Image: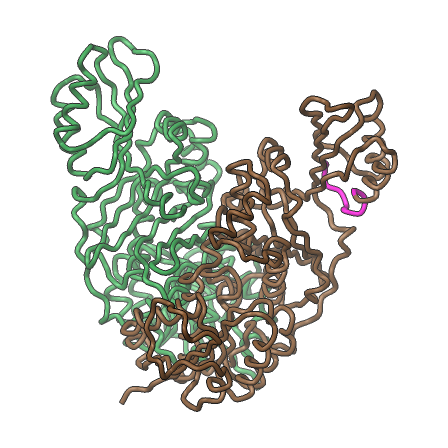
Chain colours: A green, B brown
Amino acid sequence: MQRVLGVGVIGFGTIGTGVVRLLRSEERKLRERLGAWLRLVRIADIDLERDRGVNVPREILTRDANEIIGAPDVDIVVELIGGYEPARSFVVEALRRGKCVVTANKALLATHGSEIFPAAEKAGVPLGFEASVGGGIPIVRTLRDGLVGDRVRAIYGIVNGTSNYILSEMTRERASFEEVLSRAQAQGLAEADPTYDVDGIDAAHKLCLLIQLAFGRRVPFRDIPVEGIRHVTTVDLQYASELGYAIKLLAIAKLHGTQVEARVAPTMIPQEHVLSDVNGAYNGIVVQGDALGQTFYYGLGAGMMPTATAVLADIVDAARFLLGETKRIPHPLGYPWNQQRQAKLVAPDSVESEFYLRMSLADRPGVLAQVAGILGREKVSIATMVQQGRQQNGWVPVVMRTHRARAGQVRRALQKIVQTKVVRGKPVVLRIEEELGKEAA
Amino acid sequence: MQRVLGVGVIGFGTIGTGVVRLLRSEERKLRERLGAWLRLVRIADIDLERDRGVNVPREILTRDANEIIGAPDVDIVVELIGGYEPARSFVVEALRRGKCVVTANKALLATHGSEIFPAAEKAGVPLGFEASVGGGIPIVRTLRDGLVGDRVRAIYGIVNGTSNYILSEMTRERASFEEVLSRAQAQGLAEADPTYDVDGIDAAHKLCLLIQLAFGRRVPFRDIPVEGIRHVTTVDLQYASELGYAIKLLAIAKLHGTQVEARVAPTMIPQEHVLSDVNGAYNGIVVQGDALGQTFYYGLGAGMMPTATAVLADIVDAARFLLGETKRIPHPLGYPWNQQRQAKLVAPDSVESEFYLRMSLADRPGVLAQVAGILGREKVSIATMVQQGRQQNGWVPVVMRTHRARAGQVRRALQKIVQTKVVRGKPVVLRIEEELGKEAA
């Protein structure tokens, strides 16, 4: 007599279809490994007509997700509709009814984690979210279990495939953001409304989860400074590569004592570092540990099958729990929720790094000296200054790389420079993560 | 009343010292996570005098490893002496006595796995070997648990830090193998006897384990074709980079139906692939899955703390087993041993890839045509041919890149070319893993 575990999928979109496919193709292997049968008993979606290229018996389809949450033969609820509501209610209710839950919903966990994670603990069932960060990269497992012997000090992640694809293409083809974006949208590589991806919100959601996994601390999502890639120009991408850097939308978190430095922003990283070669739709995450030094994890950040594989891995874990193979209390984050502390965010102004500055200066004697002077008075010292290209009706482009400085000092200096009227338009400021390269060497 | 779990360490060398350090520094964290105390109860080593920079109570030191294996208060035996004997006897006896075993000994597991893995299953205790492959990279866990939902088709690994360091330095400084090796030895980065590292044996041991984890099949270690890096020259490293490749000592395994293609050899990989940026003492492993596509794992391949961290992660797993947190039968490889099949190795001659050829040809009209003709008759078609550099007393260096061809065809063609006497010395042949780049794109 073999045990049967019922799986119910809410959201029959791309990932849902991939999960259904894998449950089929891997059925035998999973039976062997689990000694039980993972049976797809119900799928809920608003659209039951569209052809997904997989045929499922009509009778398991429903428009009402509550049928899944309520069904006695559903042991594992897989939430794949995304967004806040009704996803939140579905997940909370499923947990309340003691169902194991697997989700790919980073937005939900990043903003409602303090409701959902404890709810999972209270229910005493596993809540899997491997698919919510890094697509097919098993980064959640790695931070939760694999690196348990180490202390994580910093995380540098390229965690949004869409924006990374856009930056890669802009670099490769010297094409503008708008140009590449509209092509990506035409190819279905970017959403009609790309806000979450290109404005860094999706990356910030993921960073929120990485911080909780890696540091055992949480920072409110809304407190994380987020900057997108809309304003990155081909000019800066080119200067960057001439200076030996690549510009990536980086999600960064560093632990300073009890405080956490965190942000999402387009950042210059040394070309010799592996992270600089994460191109196209790929994701890459560098974990900096006390004992391990740097480890790096790389893979497709999205797409049907990679994400579905991560979902399936969580389904298998839930099955092992249900089959009594593990009695371990399934803390979603790898530690009891009540051990998690709220962390103060390091004041953005006091964060140190090197900086890339580009501005258009009046082509008059003394102007460079004046600008350098203002920077100097704010203790921002210049590593290299390049006055490149020919002047255009009285203005010349100037590019600078600074030594390590506080963000606040740079900000104040630039304010004063702008006030002097010797600069045209808004200076471009990009952080340089020089540390990354050093620590890798 | 808190439970105490006894840890006994055999081999108080570099890694052993790291493990002792971590057990100290992480003691509180581990107590919190386990709800039990991991207590270091005994350390065995031949040399009890040397100062390791950690002070341990004299009374827990012993010269007799059997004291550890036999001790009733030792629950977890950590084998860190390496080599075949007496490591083999210690591990087998520890398992026979029902102790959990953690080891970093790839040589042992690659050659005596079919004795040791079943012994662990028979004993019903965990056998952890995360530290035996990829140092601090949690690749064993990833293949065993993280990618369970996927089917692995190929593995490309830079898994020997020493040889990778030597190739990186040779490339960076255009220095010869001997030059860099002797410097590495002086700095303690290479063993006095570097055979295992530079001749690819260590990499082959690790490949053996990766194949069993990834494919659920085994190939006898002695059957794997192994080629080291002694004969790699700065000339080839330079041609490689001009052609857009990096030369790495690659451990490769691909699944073809029920057959396995496997080898260790210096290989050209496309510069645009992340694997080409794994430099110095770092390791990097690309896993090619059906669903996931390529995932990539990177970190320090050796050294005290990275390896010790991997050992500690296995100790923690063993502890969780002993504490009854998991009832799951601890199959060391993630599946029952009796499910593992012996795989036939694809005949090396029939393996296809692109090739890099360099030979010194007589500078006479018609010679190139003659060589091209011989290659053509063996169905080896040339993608690019460069007759570079000036001729030296009648001989000119010629570099070729071939299209996809069978190794056997290339071998036969070169035999015939050598017979014609138009070539001086032995032609250089290196495989090009063009596929790697394609699959990443």
The reply, left or right, for residue A189 in relation to residue B428 is left
Whether residue A15 is visible to the viewer of this picture, yes or no, is yes
The reply, left or right, for residue A207 in relation to residue A323 is left
Which x, y percent locates residue A384? 29, 26
The reply, left or right, for residue A387 in relation to residue B121 is left
Above or below, A94 against B405 in this view is below
Which x, y percent locates residue A264? 29, 45
Which x, y percent locates residue A428? 26, 28
The single residue placed furthest to the front in the displayed view is B49
Query: Tag count in the figure?
Result: 0
Q: Which quadrant of the structure image shows residue B238?
A: top right
Q: Which quadrant of the structure image shows residue A107?
A: bottom left
Name the residue at 74% across, 34% down: B359
Name the residue at 36% across, 60% down: A291
Q: Which quadrant of the structure image shows residue B374?
A: top right
Above or below, B361 against A11 in this view is above
Which x, y percent locates residue A249? 35, 41
Above or below, B328 against A179 in this view is below
Name the residue at 18% across, 15% down: A367
The reply, left or right, for residue A358 in relation to residue A258 is right
Span of residues in magenta: B402-410
Above or below, A154 against A181 in this view is below
Whether residue A8 is visible to the viewer of this picture, yes or no, is no
Image quadrant where one finds the N terminus of chain A? bottom right
Task: Please check the rendered image and state whether residue B246 is part of the magenta-colored stretch, yes or no.
Answer: no
**Which sits in the foreground, A189 or B406?**
B406
Task: Please check the rendered image and state whether residue B408 is part of the magenta-colored stretch, yes or no.
Answer: yes
